[in-house]
Image (spheres, coloured by chain):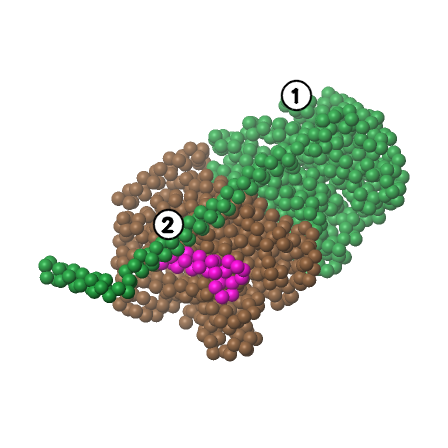
Chain colours: A green, B brown
């Protein structure tokens, strides 16, 4: 392996950047942002150099011992293979573009330096997840992305809603992490190691190594992915996370962090048995459906895209469960391109609209913001799965995998969700960009500066060509045992190998777009609630999951806490202190009775004492 | 003279010196105190760096006979168990002296008491003689009561002083009875801990005697560490105490009981320890879960942090209860990490209290805007408190969980512990951040000012310590490990069978686990006979 130290540098540069900004340059927006952008762009360049030198199809590890206590051995180690290299490209590449974009987007904010410090911290932690060679290190990075997400969601902490959203995201993630660490302990207890390579070798040698705990252990580890990738029932935090600045939504809550769960599943797929995978795939499918339904009736531009992210993550998790890590990682990568593109375009719209986010106050922006309009269009087409955009290829591979596994239920869910995706995406598209202006802000909207549009254009290029530039090849070479490497032309025509899912996929996408066109071409308000009635209300109110959790989980915990508080205050403290004080008091009172001040009593006691003494001395 | 004598001696000497300084020379009083603790902290760092991990016996030893007939001698030395504690104690001592700027009245007396506390506890940690071990802790403990009584804040001051004095005196008394019984039973006719250990190694104490003495030590020391259900003194006591006092007590003094358990009770009375550990494990659920819930209910920031500090003790007890190398090492790690953390949080709340005059969370809000440094530091402390990696606490807690998990009988409790650490801790800490630091800033707090350079120093020092050991835990584990191994070696028959073997050939280990546990018990039963 050439340039063995390069991955360390890629990993540590953002951490150094975060530390330097926090300690020294918080006063200077300019220097701070340049340091942070420099760290991640340098990371991208170094990734290119490293992959150029070593090729992508290699496998290596580099580690130093971090903690050794008896048989608990944790390395600070990096796992370098096609999977982590591709993710390095995604995190540093897409991340780099978003960093640059942020420079324009956050320019007016007085806390821009703090923003970039958090962003660098996030990049470091995300790279940690990607490169970790063992479970505990991954868990550490896992927690750190959690906290950087917390800091960035709550970036505008003076807004109560931002503070609440940050708290909610953190706690919901912690619920998942509880299961994750539990699962890690279980695996370690049974297999005696935390290192992925060692575990994999052991599991390959003997697939039944986990014995009866295999399903439970697998599902516990999946809990981690459930929290981070916002799968049902822990999906509630992601839409609220849109309180953070838009570049954060693009980077953390669309392109990278929320995909970490999927990445983790692919990294540790050898641990999961058939039952666990089945469960995972249904959770994924259900999340995809649920989130797509919710997305149909949202009115906040960022929330629509957020629900769409949820739904697409459901796709990925579903296909991992259907034993298809390659389609999952493929979709993860293309999704990173087009979803980051959509979020950044939405950010450009929001900035152009002076921080208005309600789509029913927009309209007719296609002429005012031409670049944003075109990039958004590409993103929307890619998300809807229209050929030849990137999303088409990856979504097609997912549909094909469903059929390949003969899971017709999940196939139909996936197809239905594909239709819904096209529908809600183009609902957003028509209402925001076409039609007439629905507010004064829309009339005075303006295009964003170059520092923001340039990243949009680059992302748009990748959202267009991402399907056939070898992404699936690189993943497949590692993740699929009998993978054959395809040439450029073969990749372009790959979907034709499975004509049924391809045709159905295109058909529902076009149908979705057409339906959106009919309903929203010139709409001033949403016509759906009138047609769907109560269902539309349920969709808008997110099927009342927040309220349900509020009424059950949160109330229950608060109730238990109240009971404990009461016991502590009145019983434990009161009783123990009362007992000691009362006991001392009682002793004092009874002893006081002996001191009557009465001369006769004393004389009597004195004589009594003498008598007793005499008895002992003389008689005994 | 050993460097340990200097580490503990400088603060005590400074306390004596302050007696003759007139009370209106405030700068000199402060200067002497800060200088003495700074030297002490510097020497402790030097000692920590010079410490050779894994060498046989104690290092930096110094011994002078005092009362020959009773076998009492001044005997100090360090091994892996206390080297980190002394470092932590000295740094926290320095930081708390720096934070004593908040004291405005009777400064001279305050500094004398604080320095006594610092020197006393450092000497207690270094002491290898039971008599001095106990006496020096009392020397450090008594100033706590006086400081809370005189410089405490709030209406509940008197009640809190009353409660903390009562509890801690009783705890110390029970532990004293246990220690005297140990002295008598050992038959070594010496207070020297290594000598007693040697004696008991040659002729072990009868199991019967162990079963009388061990609970005395467990509960005596346990009360000092706020073991559930004897914990209610702690949150209230820390809430009303002046912040240097809470820093020293919650951070350093509280670790004395734990240190006593690990140093004395575990190695000298293995059979009794083994049979009591199940009870200890369930009591620590009280700390982790129950006190965690109580913390969720608190409306006062200091009470919340006090309760959280009690909850953290649960993880240490869990580590001790696991009785294996990983668990006990984790316990020692948390003892050190929590010392820094508790000191940091109480120092920060002390700063906020001095500015606002209240710690009622409903009164506060949005403080990050006016106090960016203090706010960020408090946020970091809260995150460290709920086990965020990067801070030393995470390493300790994770290690404890791994240790406890390798003891099959503790599986359920480990999972409860995980819930307490990740979820409950996360809930109350983020709630506190949300109400105190986030949200709009009430208008009345527009006049708050952030810490200047000198005020920042103690916070930065404590944060840096947390980071150093959190990022590179080997600095500690390499030193702690060999000596913990010696202690848990007594439990080896238990360990050898029930811990998961680090070879992958061992298939379906879970099936043999329960069998192994009972086998181990049988083995121990044989030892008992």
CA gap, disc 2 and disc 1: 59 Å
- Tell me the residue at 48%/75% (across/down): B18
- Tell me the residue at 65%/53% (across/down): B365
Q: Nearer the viewer, residue B488 or A115?
A: A115
The answer to whether residue A619 is left or right of residue A532 is left
In the picture, the disc for residue B432 is none
The answer to whether residue A533 is left or right of residue A271 is right
Contact check, label 2 and label 1, Cβ < 8 Å? no
Q: Nearer the viewer, residue A614 or A340?
A: A614
Magenta stretch, overall SS: helix
Q: Quadrant of the C terminus of chain B?
A: top left
Question: Bounds of the magenta span?
Answer: B148-174
**Residue tagged by mark 1?**
A408
Mark 1 crowd level (few <14, some 14–19, many ≥20, 10 Å Cα): few
Residue A444 in the image: above or below residue B509? below
- Tell me the residue at 43%/41% (across/down): B410
- Tell me the residue at 78%/48% (across/down): A105
Mark 1 secondary-structure assignment: helix
Q: Is residue B292 magenta?
A: no
Q: Where does residue B449 sit, x and y in percent of width and height? A: 67, 63
Q: Where does residue B43 sit, x and y in percent of width and height? A: 49, 68
Q: Where does residue A330 sit, x and y in percent of width and height? A: 69, 34
Report whether residue A559 is seen.
Answer: yes
Check the residue under mark 2 and report the chain it is in: B
Report whether residue A149 is seen.
Answer: no
Mark 2 secondary-structure assignment: helix
**Residue tagged by mark 2?**
B489
Q: Where does residue A124 sit, x and y in percent of width and height? A: 65, 49
Residue B517 in the image: above or below residue B83? above
Q: Nearer the viewer, residue B257 or A565?
A: A565
């Amino acid at each position: 392996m050439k340039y063995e130290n390069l991955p360390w540098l890629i990993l540590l540069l953002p951490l150094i950047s975060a530390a330097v900004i926090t300690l020294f340059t918080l006063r200077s927006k300019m220097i701070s942002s340049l340091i942070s952008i420099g760290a991640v762009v340098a990371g991208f360049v170094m990734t290119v150099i490293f992959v150029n030198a070593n090729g992508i199809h290699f496998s290596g590890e580099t580690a130093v011992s971090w903690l050794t206590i008896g048989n608990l051995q944790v390395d600070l180690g990096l796992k370098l293979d096609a999977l982590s290299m591709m993710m390095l490209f995604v995190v540093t590449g897409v991340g780099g573009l978003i960093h640059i974009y942020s420079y324009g987007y956050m320019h007016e904010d007085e806390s821009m330096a703090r923003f970039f410090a958090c962003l660098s911290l996030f990049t470091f932690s995300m790279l940690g997840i990607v490169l970790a060679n063992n479970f505990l290190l991954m868990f550490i990075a896992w927690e750190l992305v959690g906290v950087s997400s917390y800091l960035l969601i709550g970036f505008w902490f003076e807004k109560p809603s931002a503070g609440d959203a940050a708290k909610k995201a953190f706690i919901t993630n912690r619920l998942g992490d509880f299961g994750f660490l539990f699962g890690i302990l279980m695996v370690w207890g049974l297999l005696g190691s935390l290192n992925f390579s060692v575990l994999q070798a052991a599991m390959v040698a003997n697939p039944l190594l986990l014995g009866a705990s295999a399903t439970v252990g697998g599902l516990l580890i999946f809990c981690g992915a459930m929290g981070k990738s916002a799968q049902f029932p822990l999906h509630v935090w992601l839409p609220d996370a849109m309180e953070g600045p838009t570049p954060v939504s693009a980077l953390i809550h669309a392109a990278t962090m929320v995909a970490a769960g999927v990445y983790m599943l692919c990294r540790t797929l050898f641990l999961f048995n058939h039952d666990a995978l089945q469960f995972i795939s249904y959770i994924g499918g259900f999340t995809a459906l649920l989130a797509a339904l919710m997305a149909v009736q949202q009115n906040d531009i960022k929330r629509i895209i957020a629900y769409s992210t949820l739904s697409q993550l459901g796709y990925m998790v579903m296909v991992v469960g259907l034993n298809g890590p390659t389609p999952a990682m493929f979709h993860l990568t293309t999704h990173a391109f087009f979803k980051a593109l959509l979020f950044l375009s939405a950010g450009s719209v929001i900035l152009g609209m002076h921080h208005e986010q309600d789509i029913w106050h927009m309209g007719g922006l296609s002429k005012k913001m031409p670049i944003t309009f075109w990039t958004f269009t590409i993103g929307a087409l890619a998300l809807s799965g229209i050929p030849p955009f990137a999303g088409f290829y990856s979504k097609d591979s997912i549909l094909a995998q469903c059929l390949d596994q003969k899971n017709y239920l999940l196939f139909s869910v996936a197809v239905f969700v594909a239709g819904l995706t096209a529908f809600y995406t183009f609902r957003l598209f028509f209402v925001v960009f076409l039609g007439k202006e629905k507010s004064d802000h829309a009339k005075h909207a303006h295009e964003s500066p170059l520092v923001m549009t340039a990243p949009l254009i680059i992302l748009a290029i990748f959202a267009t060509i991402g399907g056939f530039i070898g992404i699936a090849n690189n993943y497949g070479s590692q993740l699929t045992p009998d993978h054959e490497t395809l040439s450029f032309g073969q990749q372009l025509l790959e979907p034709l190998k499975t004509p049924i899912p391809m045709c159905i996929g295109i058909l529902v996408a076009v149908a979705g777009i057409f339906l959106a066109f009919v309903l929203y071409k010139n709409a001033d308000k949403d016509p759906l609630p009138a047609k769907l009635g109560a269902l539309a209300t349920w969709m808008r109110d997110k099927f009342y999951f927040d309220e349900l959790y509020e009424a059950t989980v949160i109330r229950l915990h608060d109730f238990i806490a109240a009971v404990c508080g009461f016991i502590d205050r009145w019983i434990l403290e009161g009783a123990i202190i009362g007992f000691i004080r009362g006991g001392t008091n009682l002793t004092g009172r009874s002893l006081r009775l002996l001191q009557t001040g009465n001369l006769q009593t004393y004389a009597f006691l004195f004589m009594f004492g003498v008598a007793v003494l005499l008895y002992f001395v003389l008689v005994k | 003279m050993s460097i340990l004598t200097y580490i503990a001696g400088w603060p005590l000497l400074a306390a004596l010196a302050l007696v003759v300084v007139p009370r209106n020379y405030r700068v000199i009083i402060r200067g002497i105190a800060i200088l003495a603790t700074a030297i002490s902290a510097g020497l402790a760092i030097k000692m920590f760096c010079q410490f050779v991990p894994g060498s046989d016996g104690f290092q930096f030893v110094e011994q002078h006979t005092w009362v020959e007939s009773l076998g009492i001698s001044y005997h100090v030395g360090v091994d892996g168990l206390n080297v980190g504690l002394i470092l932590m104690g000295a740094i926290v001592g320095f930081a708390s002296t720096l934070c004593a700027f908040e004291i405005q009245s009777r400064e001279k007396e305050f500094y004398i008491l604080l320095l006594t506390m610092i020197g006393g506890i450092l000497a207690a940690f270094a002491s290898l003689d039971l008599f001095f071990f106990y006496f020096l802790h009392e020397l450090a403990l008594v100033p706590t009561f006086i400081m809370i009584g005189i410089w405490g804040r709030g209406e509940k001051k008197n009640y809190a002083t009353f409660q903390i004095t009562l509890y801690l005196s009783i705890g110390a008394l029970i532990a004293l009875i246990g220690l005297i019984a140990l002295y008598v039973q050992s038959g070594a006719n010496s207070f020297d801990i290594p000598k007693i250990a040697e004696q008991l190694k040659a002729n072990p104490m009868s199991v019967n005697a162990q079963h009388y003495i061990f609970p005395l030590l467990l509960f005596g020391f346990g009360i000092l560490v706020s073991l559930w259900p004897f914990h209610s003194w702690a949150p209230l006591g820390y809430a009303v105490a002046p912040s240097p006092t809470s820093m020293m007590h919650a951070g350093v003094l509280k670790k004395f009981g734990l240190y006593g358990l690990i140093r004395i009770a575990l190695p000298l009375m293995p059979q009794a320890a083994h049979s009591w550990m199940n009870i200890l494990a369930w009591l620590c659920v009280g700390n982790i879960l129950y006190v965690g819930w109580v913390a969720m209910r608190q409306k006062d920031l200091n009470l919340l942090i006090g309760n959280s500090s009690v909850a953290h003790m649960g993880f240490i007890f869990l580590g001790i209860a696991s009785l294996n190398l990983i668990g006990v090492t984790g316990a020692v790690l948390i003892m050190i990490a929590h010392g820094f953390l508790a000191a940091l949080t109480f120092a920060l709340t002390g700063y906020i209290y001095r500015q606002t005059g209240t710690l009622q969370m409903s009164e506060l809000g949005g403080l990050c805007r006016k106090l960016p440094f203090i706010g960020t530091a408090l946020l970091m402390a809260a995150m460290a408190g709920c086990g965020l990696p990067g801070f030393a606490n995470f390493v300790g807690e994770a290690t404890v969980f791994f240790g406890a998990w390798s003891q099959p009988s503790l599986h359920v409790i480990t999972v409860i512990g995980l819930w307490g650490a990740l979820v409950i801790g996360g809930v109350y800490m983020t709630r506190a951040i949300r109400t105190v630091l986030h949200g709009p800033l009430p208008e009345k707090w527009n006049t708050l000012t952030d810490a200047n350079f000198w005020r920042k120093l103690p916070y930065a020092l404590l944060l840096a310590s947390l980071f150093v050991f959190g990022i590179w835990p080997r600095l500690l584990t390499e030193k702690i490990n060999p000596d913990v191994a010696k202690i848990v070696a007594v439990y080896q028959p238990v360990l050898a069978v029930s811990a998961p073997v680090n070879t992958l050939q061992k298939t379906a280990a879970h099936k043999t686990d329960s069998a192994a546990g009972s086998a181990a018990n049988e083995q121990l039963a044989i030892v008992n006979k």
